Image: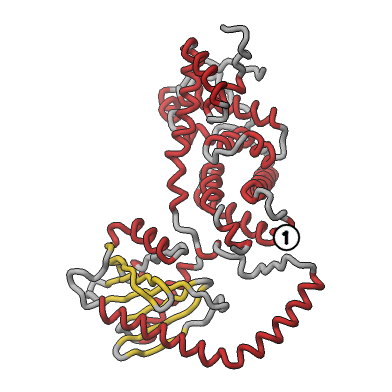
Amino acid sequence: MNSQKAAVSELDLHAYVDGRLSEERRAEVGAYLTASAQESERVRAYQEQNEILHTLFDSVLDEPIPTKWQSSRRHWNFPLRPVAAASVCIIVGGLLGWVLRGEYAGRSAKRVDFARQAAMAHAVYTPEVRHPVEVSAEQEEHLVGWLSKRLGTPLKAPHLLDLGYELVGGRLLPGDQGPVAQFMYQDKNGQRLTLYIKTDASTERETAFRFSQEGSVGVFYWIDRQLSYALSGELQKTELLQVADAIYKKLNP
Amino acid sequence: MGNDEHIATHIPQLRRYARALTGDYSAAEDLVQDTLERAWKRIGLWRLGSDLRAWLFTIMHNLHVNQLKADSRKQGQPPEQATLDLSVRPTQEDRLELRDLNKALRRLSNEQREVLLLVGLEQMSYEEVAKVLGIPIGTVMSRLSRGRDQLRAMMEGSSAAPQLKVIK
């Protein structure tokens, strides 16, 4: 070996495997490995280990993230000292109370709009025989990934097989504040339900189920963290509530 | 972006690491959950501008180590077999099993597995790994070296004991 170059150490070999060497040193270690079959075999084995690790575990990166992990919700943290935080709370609380006097009327109107839009989308797409959805349930992973990306937040298509409803697929729809996702389900009699989901920028984090009857379509809707959900179907109110409740529980295991 | 969103951007990696570390879906999901809860509670202690990823992985490391200790107390056993006895000649069945890197990974000590995964899977620099685990960089290198050696020996179903490598 060239005596002017620093001897290749164990550390160099690992840094070589992990791509942590300077270009110059990398070339020197590379030359050393070419000369030593045993060492180059060892380095190859280490590189293979890294590759297998990625093969084994990289798919975890694509799993949809449970909504309960999106935000701390109950753990509000003010990055302020407690005293300052308390006074801010009092001021903000007072202001909010004043501002919200008029806000409530507007907000409930918005909610009804949301239910109506969901019912409309349900009525438009559920009668479709050939094209009920844009992406079918066969490509569920792609569907959920795509819709999550468009809505800018991880979504889940809850599985309702235990209630007799199979996922048909889903589509992307325009909403008044941006894209909306629609998942469609169907039971063995062809009865269809749709779950309409939009991101919710309002400060409300959670609401109870609310019901709205839009013609023949019943809609249960609620807010769960940053998403608003509406379940539409031409079912008895109690049956629809049962499904809505199951969906809520599946999304909040 | 709020703190929650900052933290959320690291969830996929935390989850991948937890899955590889524990080798168990629900144990990993619980570990991520606990890590997030602690992070949300303590985000006030994180210095803005410092490495959030390293901070989160440190939380996960501490929780995991505590969990292992609690488990071993429950069972009255040492936390984990620290070294692997490779002098025993593996049977044919063993050899097939050992080809499975995932299974081989389970047979490393937790300390070696952590380093191996943070470097090989999470692609952290050696300095970062030292910071996350709170150990000197020399220790990172020796755990990495031994861990890789042992994995290799297991993967190849080597019947010979691996030669000890000395860090120069």
As drawn, the residue found furthest toward the left would be: A130
Which chain does the numbered disc 1 sit on? B
Residue at the spot x=68%, y=49% of the render?
Answer: B50
Which quadrant of the figure has residue A170?
A: bottom left
Quadrant where the N terminus of chain A lies? top right
Residue at the spot x=62%, y=9% of the render?
Answer: A4
Amino acid under label 1?
Answer: Gly
Which quadrant of the figure has residue A115?
A: bottom left
- Total number of numbered labels? 1
From what the image shows, is residue B17 above or below residue A183? above
Residue at the spot x=64%, y=38% of the render?
Answer: B129
Q: Position of residue A248 (x, y in %)?
A: 46, 73
Of residue B25 and residue A116, the one placed in the foreground of this image is: A116
Of residue A178 and residue B123, the one placed in the foreground of this image is: A178
Q: Position of residue B158 (x, y in %)?
A: 48, 19
Residue at the spot x=26%, y=79% of the render?
Answer: A124
From what the image shows, is residue A235 above or below residue B113? below
Disc 1: CA contacts within 10 A as few (<14), some (14-19) or many (>=20): some
Residue marked by disc 1: B44
Q: Position of residue A43 (x, y in %)?
A: 50, 22
Mark 1: secondary structure: helix
Query: Is residue B5 among the parts visible in the rendering?
Result: yes
